[in-house]
Image (cartoon, grey):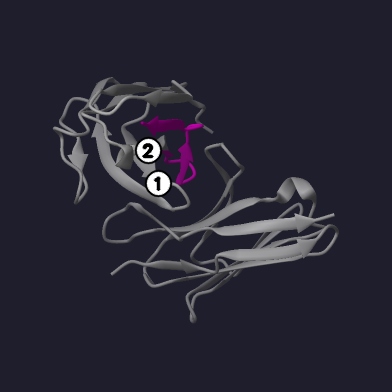
């Protein structure tokens, strides 16, 4: 079936790079997504990558996709305290067309 | 990208009562979705709301507990009926944007049931 796994917690120092990892099971997924959820807020779409791409860069964000290993990562350069949030990885299931979410990774940025 | 608003943003309700959550989108969309996020958990899809037809519910969710209306292409409501403390969650409305193929979320409604 369709499943998405993430590590639950990551702590970094301000100014360092953060790398949040995600694995998924549906090799036919067309799109993969990263969402950010700040405390008490809804989900904000950060970025997405089409399955025929290996990498996508958007300012401080870099998404890497390894289709062979079904591994997705989100790198945040020069991490700031405002980046502290929960980050959700999601895939669009090829069978259902619905978003399948990971458990979310809590990013803690220490000053 | 679609701009989505929800009302109320939060509420505290008594056990046994019902709450209706509204979702408004700034553009016409075919499919709208309702999700639940229990404390400390990921998102779970409750149902898909299509205009002009009944909502399609996911396993574990039933219409009597979570009735949904979709009167037009920009608006939907989700009612949480006969609430219990286990219904305390954030409820999120969401829409697909087909160009590009992305899904956007409203700010959520934070519900606490006492």
Q: Residue B88 has which mark?
A: 2
The x and y percentages for residue A65 are: 56, 70
The x and y percentages for residue B21 are: 35, 24
Would residue B20 be found to the left or right of residue A33 on screen? left
- What is the C-alpha distance between the residues marked 1 and 2? 7 Å
Q: Which residue, given by chain and number where applicable, does mark 1 sit on?
A: B38
Q: Nearer the viewer, residue A4 or B53?
A: A4
Question: Do the CB atoms of the residues marked 1 and 2 lie less than 8 Å apart?
Answer: yes
Q: Are marks 1 and 2 on the same chain?
A: yes
- Work out which quarter of the rendered image holds the C terminus of chain B and state it: top left
**Range of residues picked out in magenta:** B96-114
Q: Is residue B88 above or below residue A36?
A: above
Q: Secondary structure at mark 2?
A: loop
What chain does mark 2 sit on? B
The x and y percentages for residue A108 are: 70, 57
Q: Is residue B85 above or below residue A29?
A: above
Residue at the image position 19 percent from the left and 49 percent from the top: B60
């Amino acid at each position: 079936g369709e499943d998405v796994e993430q590590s639950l917690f990551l702590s970094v120092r301000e100014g360092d790079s953060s790398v949040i990892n995600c694995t998924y099971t549906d090799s036919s997924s067309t799109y993969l997504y990263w969402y950010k959820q700040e405390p008490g807020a809804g989900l904000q779409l950060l970025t997405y990558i089409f399955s025929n791409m290996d990498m996508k860069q958007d300012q401080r964000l870099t998404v890497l996709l390894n289709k062979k290993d079904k591994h997705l990562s989100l790198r945040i350069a020069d991490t700031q305290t405002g980046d502290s949030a929960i980050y959700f990885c999601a895939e669009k299931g090829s069978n259902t067309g619905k978003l399948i979410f990971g458990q979310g990774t809590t990013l803690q940025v220490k000053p | 990208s679609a701009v989505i608003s929800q009302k109320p943003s939060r509420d505290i309700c008594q056990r046994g009562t019902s709450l209706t959550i509204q979702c408004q989108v700034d553009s016409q969309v075919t499919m709208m979705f309702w999700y639940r996020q229990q404390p400390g958990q990921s998102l779970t899809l409750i149902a898909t709301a299509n205009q002009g037809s009944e909502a399609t519910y996911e396993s574990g969710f039933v219409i009597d507990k979570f009735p949904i209306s979709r009167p037009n292409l920009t608006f939907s409501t989700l009612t949480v009926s006969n609430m219990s403390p286990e219904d305390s969650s954030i409820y999120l409305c969401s829409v697909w944007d087909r160009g590009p193929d992305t899904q956007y979320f409203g700010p959520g409604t934070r519900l606490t049931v006492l």
